[in-house]
Image (cartoon, rainbow, N blue to C red):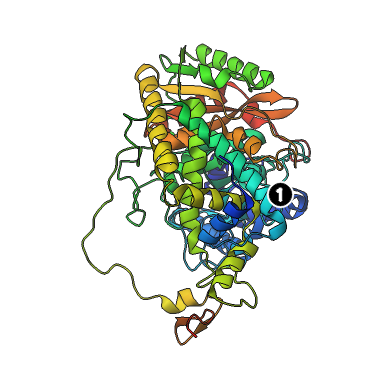
Amino acid sequence: MHNLTIAQLAEGLRNKTFSSVELTHAFLKRIHDFDGELNCYITLTEEQALAQANTADERIAAGNVRPLTGVPISQKDIFCTKGVRTSCGSRMLDNFVAPYDASVVERFHAAGAVMLGKLNMDEFAMGSSNETSYYGPVRNPWRTDSVPGGSSGGSAAAIAARLTPGATGTDTGGSIRQPAAFCGITGIKPTYGRVSRWGMIAFASSLDQGGAMARTAEDCALMLQVMTGFDERDSTSLDHPVPDYRAKLAESLSGVKIGLPKEFFGDGLDADIADAIHAAVDEFRKLGATVREVSLPNMKLSVPAYYVVAPAECSSNLARYDGVRFGYRCKDPKDLHDFYMRSRGEAFGAEVKRRILIGTYALSAGYYDAYYLKAQKIRRLISDDFRAAFQEVDVIIGPTSPSVAFRLGEKTVDPIAMYLSDIYTIAVNLAGLPGMSIPAGFAADLPVGMQLIGDYFSEDRLLNIAHRYQQATDWHLRVPQGYA
Amino acid sequence: MSLDAQAVKKIGWLARLAIDEEKVAAYASDLSGILDFVAQMNAVDTSDTAPMAHPLEQAQRLRPDEISETDQRDLFQAHAPAVEAGLYLVPKVIE
């Protein structure tokens, strides 16, 4: 059962081929068998999962089936879950039991999904390797001495290892797409504002966006259908009609115009990855698409601009963790200043501290124009580059990451080297566009991710393009050795 | 742009974030490296570019001035480290 897709599981449940309780037990057993080594889950919610599975089986028996009734789904531990620890991968929230459900979690519950547990992640989603988690790194099931990517590393590794059929992720600079690439799965970050941020713990509010991760584009479409939509509780939620994502999956790619940005294929890209992407582009030609080169001249400024905007917003958002109302509190403070300084100093890890410090500096008196304002202007230039490109093409395709999964510890000593692993994904967040990563081959026996970038609100088109590719290829069906 | 140990401590104070004394030098080096890296932004002239606050130029929505939240103080305070009589407890501020 664990090798079936969400679409197949939903069908099997409806046809009563298996029950949700059987299915949930099967996944929980796999988690017990395999997660000791991989460390994908921070918290398992077994009792709640079995209760939800029971309810789902009753609904199925009564013929009252919702889109995901009885299907197990796991939540990235950045989404608040009522009555369940929501740690955000941080010591700061190690003791935090959320008093309410995030909008995304509410929507999955309403759709009938069964929550297996909460998935490991970089602390407060700040990282590209899952190594900044307070709960220890996640291991990549394709090669366990390597990282799964980050920050949604637990989500990606759990899906690749068949410890869940689908999971939520969040993407501020590549945190869905890069781990999807490293673990050989499919992930989509929608247009900024598409999925509610209510109850999704904030990192950089002008960039943060929740999305779906699964093995196939069809499964991502099913999940996104549940997740997407206006929410008045999120001040940046978009009130824009939601199409039927699954209905458009099979549309022909004849005449689709693909743009290859020359800046995505320059120095720094693994030659094996470039070869895999070019082979995938040839596959799209066979499917009827036309291909041309485009240019995003300000791409090189995206990582520098991001490391002003994201830390600045992080320093502001994380000011709420003061030890007073919830979260970690230091022992025996000598006064209120000591209380704040040590509660925060003892509970945040090194990368979170670096970003709070950079952001505080960039926003301190006299520096606003030189840093935050400058970065917001660069955002405009990057966004204008994409606008110009989308006058000419329907979708932009390139690698998701310049390398395949790197080894644990390989980039932890040099923050800039770690930051550059998101060089192809960050511009998409700065512009607020939808982006996707799908499996497109292997290099040195590790998965290669191909990135698809679309214009605003084109999630249906991205899913369609990804689905047609997955109908013609089998990269997304490969299983890491030992996890079949 | 280079930050010294003194500057790191000052920023740490502004952020109310204690930095272990033996790690101050490492933070100074990391932060200086990051600031040098982001200085690449200065290579492009943006004097005629408007800053981008929202990708779709969306403004904040307004809503009617009506009560939309109910009182959940007891629920929220159940997660607080120290509470007495409905109040959050912190170290004494006034002598």
Above or below A207: residue B84: below
**Classed neighbour count for the residue bearing mark 1: other residues with Cα under 10 Å, few (<14), some (14–19), many (≥20):** many
Above or below A235: residue A484: above
Where is the N terminus of chain B found, in terms of image quarters?
A: top right
Along the line of sight, which residue is nearer the eye, A270 or A9?
A270
**Residue drawn at the location 69% of the way across and 48% of the way down:** B26
**x and y, in percent, of residue A449 in the image:** 61, 29
Q: Is residue A394 left or right of residue A325?
A: left
Above or below A343: residue A356: above
Along the line of sight, which residue is nearer the eye, A81 or A388?
A388
Along the line of sight, which residue is nearer the eye, B68 or A417?
A417
Residue situated furthest bottom in the rendering = B85
Residue situated furthest left in the rendering = B64
**Residue drawn at the location 42% of the way across and 24% of the way down:** A251
Residue wearing tag 1: A137
Chain at tag 1: A
Q: Is any atom of residue A382 visible in this view?
A: yes
Q: Is any atom of residue A164 visible in this view?
A: no
Above or below A52: residue A132: above
Q: Regarding mark 1 in the picture, which secondary structure is present there?
A: loop
How many discs appear? Answer: 1
Q: Is residue A393 left or right of residue B27?
A: left
**Residue drawn at the location 49% of the way across and 45% of the way down:** A310
**Residue drawn at the location 41% of the way across and 32% of the way down:** A378
**x and y, in percent, of residue A369 in the image:** 39, 42
Amino acid on which disc 1 is placed? Pro
**x and y, in percent, of residue A160 in the image:** 66, 40
* Quadrant housing residue A199: bottom left
**x and y, in percent, of residue B41 in the image:** 47, 32
Along the line of sight, which residue is nearer the eye, A188 or A220?
A188
